[in-house]
Amino acid sequence: MSERVLIISLLVVVLAVIAYKILFTTFSISIESYPDKIFVNDSSPVSVKVVALNRLGMRIPFRHLDGEFAVREGVEKIDIIKVKKDEIIFKTKNNPGRLVILYYTRVVPFPVEIVLNIETATIASLYCPGHSFC
């Protein structure tokens, strides 16, 4: 009887450790940008968030990445509103072009490069996203 309890207890502990490694350990990082398209001189703020993913490709519950953002290219094209450890919020100025943001964290040995294009808004791009014509 006691051997059976010991084996079951050991099996539960091993399964709990495996589940922890699969569900709660950071395997990769995902970049989320809202809105998808960024336009020049837009009044709405742009949010870029870095999310930790587990081995199943899902967000890790109760986990926020601890990192730092740095704008490498295009700092003159944006006004930074708020910077958190896993999110940067900014508004665009009147300059279209390329924006490169670096994200440094202990999870990844090298900085994560986030490349965004700031586009000039046209009627077709506003009303027919993804199409060259309506």
Image: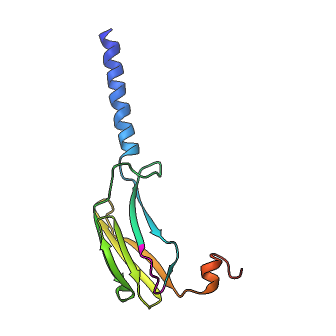
What percent of the width, then of the height, locates residue 57? Answer: 47, 52
What percent of the width, then of the height, locates residue 98? Answer: 45, 84
Pick whichever, 85 or 127, lies toward us: 127
| Vertical side of 84 occupied by 22: above or below | above
| Vertical side of 16 occupied by 120: above or below | below
What percent of the width, then of the height, locates residue 74? Answer: 38, 86
Image quadrant where residue 102 sits: bottom left
Residue in view at x 30 percent, y 76 percent = 70
Pick whichever, 27 or 69, lies toward us: 69
Q: Residue furthest front?
A: 43
Q: Residue furthest top?
A: 1
What percent of the width, then of the height, locates residue 86? Answer: 33, 64
Q: Residue furthest bottom?
A: 94
**From the viewer's perspective, is 40 left or right of 108?**
right
Residue in view at x 33 percent, y 62 percent = 108
Pick whichever, 52 or 35, lies toward us: 35
**From the viewer's perspective, is 92 left or right of 68?**
right
Residue in view at x 35 percent, y 83 percent = 79
Residue in view at x 29 percent, y 11 percent = 2
Which region of the structure is painted magenta?
Answer: 40-46
Image quadrant where residue 80 sits: bottom left
Q: Look at the image and say whether residue 43 sits in the magenta stretch.
A: yes
> Looking at the figure, which quarter contains the N terminus?
top left
Pick whichever, 45 or 120, lies toward us: 45
Dominant secondary structure of the magenta stretch? loop
